[in-house]
Amino acid sequence: MAESLRRMVNNGNFTSLQDKLEKWLDDYHINTNDQNVARACELVELNARVQGQLFTLLNLVASEGGLYGGVNTLKNRLLPWLSSGFAASAASVSADTSLAVLAEAAEKDRQITEIQSHYEQQLDNMEKDLVETKDDAAALKAELDETRDELDDTRRKSTGTMMATEDEIIRLKEDQVRSLQNRIRDRRLQLRLTRDESASLRTRVDMIGDYERQVRVLRDEIAILRGERAVLENGLPEPLPPLPPPRPGSPTHAKLTDSVRRSRLIGRYNDLFSIDRVEALTTLRRYIPDDEEMVQRIVFVGVQEAFHAAKMAFRAMRLRVRKNLAITHIGPETLEEAVLDYIVRNTDLFDVNGAVQDTIRAMNVNPKISFPAEIDFNLLHPFIREVCRCGWGMCALEPPLDISPATDAELYNELKYRRSYDSEFTAPLVAYHVWPALMEYDRVVVKGEAVTKRGASLSRNNTNILRIEQSPRRATSPRPMSPSRSRSPSPTRSGSAMSVSSRPSSRSSPRPYSAASSYVSY
């Protein structure tokens, strides 16, 4: 079909038809009646040949569409035209069959002819210039031969001098290479010393951070003890930073700003996935260039542990504030509302550095991920810090937002996750997770992302554990098993045949709570 259309375009039948029409118009008043009739017959014959070729093309195009290819178009456009004997009225003929296309094509051909004549004239002028240039080139060639002979004589005379110069150049190059090697050796030594200094400084910074966190904890305990002593002595505790007294029956600051904070935190969660996560992946790929799955797992585990650390810190803050406010709280809002309102107004009390260090310690003992021995997870400190802030803010919502529990080899859920581009779309199980889903109780707020592969999850987990046991990792102390680091069971659906004890425990999703329920959940 395409070859037939190309041959028809190359023949230029429409162009010749337009040319004959224009010539006939120019000679119409000069020709006799017989000559005009002969011209008209010639145009009709040429038009018939063109129509025959067009019908052949129409047949080929329709046959390419199968048995009923182009039936509607043939019914609507061709059959009415054929039924009127190739003389359809202007109302039944579409604008596509107008001869304006032929006129436009003829105008374009005329312009092409003018451009071609102009081009041929320029080509003649260029040929003349080429002849003159050839003559000049012949003269220059003769001069070049003479100069070449003189250059050969000079080269033969200067051969001895050049040999001496080449020896000097080789000697200078050797000196430069030797000096460059010495400089590189000095730079490597300086770099090694700088790395040792940075490692020692990093150790000191970690110790300072631990000391500061211990100081903050001791200060909080001292404040609590002072309040208890004030109660025992005077009946009044040492007050917390004061809250503005609410009006009777008016909503608290936390309730007034809940919807705004919720939308802002959801947008921040999306930015963490699209911007901060990509930057973290780019940083990790510099040190783990050949294992994309491990890079994705490290980021995902970092998000899980950061949310868990933020929730633990929120629970500790909530217990401490509730203990202080319970002594002097008189209403009109409930005690839980007053506690949440105080936390929302004093977000700067969140120990984000302590949460980041808890997250890194948890990642160091996680059996699913590994890292080169000379690097640690402090590379992800900015990313983990932002995730901890986001998780803290989501804990202060009513109802709170949390990431969904996730385990390898779980059944893929289209309501909670979307598949990554490199997944096997027919695989029913999740090989590993890329990003957790954001949940409000059992409702999905933001979908996560997972990779599905057939039979890859369990074998990969065993490979990761074996590689971690064999790799020369730095000695890291395991996290102390205190009540504040205990995990809550993952939420279950009503009517499910699986019990809570048979479900895999989650680092990121405690059981949902309401304002009237126990505050220990958050």
Image (cartoon, helix red, strand yellow):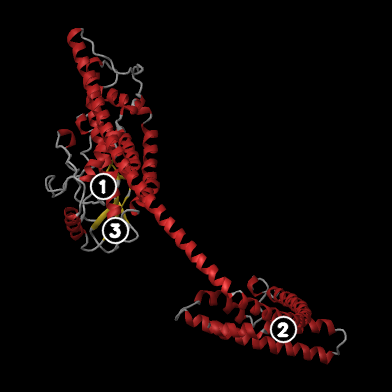
Q: Quadrant of the C terminus?
A: top left
**Which mark, by number, is residue 301?**
1
Q: CA distance from mark 2 to mark 1?
A: 75 Å
Q: What's under tag 1, amino acid-wise?
A: Val
Work out which residue is located at the far top of the displayed protein and give it.
Answer: 234
- Which residue shows up at 71% across the image and 87% down it? 44
- The disc labelled 3 sits on which kind of residue? Asp
Q: Is residue 509 above or below residue 484?
A: below
**Residue closer to the observer: 166 or 520:** 166
- Seen at 21% across and 54% down, the residue is 408
Residue drawn 40% across and 47% down?
275
Residue 493 visible in rendering: no
Marks 2/3: CA–CA distance: 68 Å
Quickly name the residue at label 2. 17
Task: Check if mark 2's residue and mark 1's residue have beta carbons within 8 Å.
Answer: no
Quadrant of the rendered structure where residue 455 is?
A: bottom left
Q: Position of residue 22 (x, y in %)?
A: 78, 81
Coordinates of residue 387 in the picture (x, y in percent): 32, 40
Viewer-side residue, 430 vs 347:
347
Label of residue 291 in the image: 3
Amino acid type at image mark 2: Leu
Q: Is residue 444 visible?
A: yes
Judged left or right of residue 184, residue 24 is right
Give the mark nearer the N terminus: 2 vs 1.
2
Percent position (x, y) of residue 36?
Answer: 81, 88
Name the secondary structure under disc 3. Answer: loop
Q: Where does the image place residue 41, in percent across and percent down from the top left?
A: 74, 90
| Residue count near mark 1 (Cα–Cα under 10 Å), binned few <14, some 14–19, many ≥20 | many
Mark 2 element type = helix
Give the foreground label among 3 and 1. Answer: 3
